[in-house]
Each structure stands twice: as C-alpha cells, then as structure tokens.
Amino acid sequence: MLPTENRLRRRQDFASAVRRGRRAGRPLLVVHLRTDTDTRDPHAAGGSAPPARAGFVVSKAVGGAVTRNLVKRRLRHLVRERLSVLPPGSLVVVRALPGAGDADHSQLARDLDAALGRLLGVAP
C-alpha cells in the first residue's frame, strides 16, 4: 500500500501528469511523469519539498475486477519500492495495458523499471 502522502487522488493531478508530463511506453504499461510541478500541495508540511505522488489507471480492457485489482496491487507495491528514485514533487501515472492482466510480478517490474529509467535519464 502506498502511504497517503504519496497517492494521487484528484482528477486535476492525473490530468496534469498525463497532459503536461513526459511519457514512456512499454508492452505492459505506459508511465507518465511530470517533474516540473509549480503548484504546492496543500497537505505538505511548511517549507519542505512535497513528496512524489503516484496514481494508477487500470481499465476493463485488462480483465475482470479480480484481475484489475491484482494488477493495481502489484503496481502499487512496485511503485512504493521506487519512490526514493523519483524527484520530490513529481507526479507519476501508471496506466496498465491489456497484456498486464496476464503478466507476472517480475514482468511488470521489468517494464516499470525500463519506463522510469527512460523518463529519469538513467541507464538500464
């Protein structure tokens, strides 16, 4: 589970990451990253940098409710482990593609790492 301060909840935040952020596509998922957030999080403490926040989009094309929830749980777990590499204040939206329902944990991790590496400019 992602900590509360690291969750994207508002529609405007999702739209901002998708429309104004950079995108990296992989066979199982698409990752949108926006690092140049000018808006301040109203829930952030005083003068500290806002934390990186992540949200997930898993449509019915991925599978039934059980499959979609399984994919969301796996993606939340994977992103939680990678929060430390994200710049403070960044917004991340991970959109699962239809093949993600049949993929296992390691395949999702590989695609997520490749997409984040491309967006952050890190060599694989």
Image (cartoon, grey):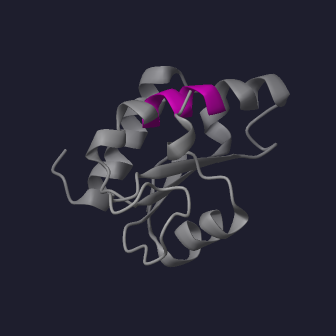
Q: Left of 104 or right of it: where is 84?
A: left
Q: Quadrant of the C terminus?
A: top left
Question: Up-down: is 44 above or below 22?
Answer: above
Give whichever of 123, 1 is nearer the camera: 1
- Tell me which residue sits at (32%, 50%) in the image: 86
Quick check: can you spot residue 28? no
Instruction: Specify the principal SS of the magenta part.
Output: helix
Q: Is residue 19 above or below residue 78?
A: below
Residue 39 lies left or right of residue 100; in this view the side is: left
Q: Which range of residues does the magenta coloring cover?
A: 72-79
Front position in the image: 37 or 65:
37
Q: Residue furthest left?
A: 123
Residue 113 lies within the magenta run: no
Relative image position of residue 47 (x, y in whole percent): 33, 63
The x and y percentages for residue 87 are 30, 56
Which residue is located at x 52 percent, y 44 percent?
5
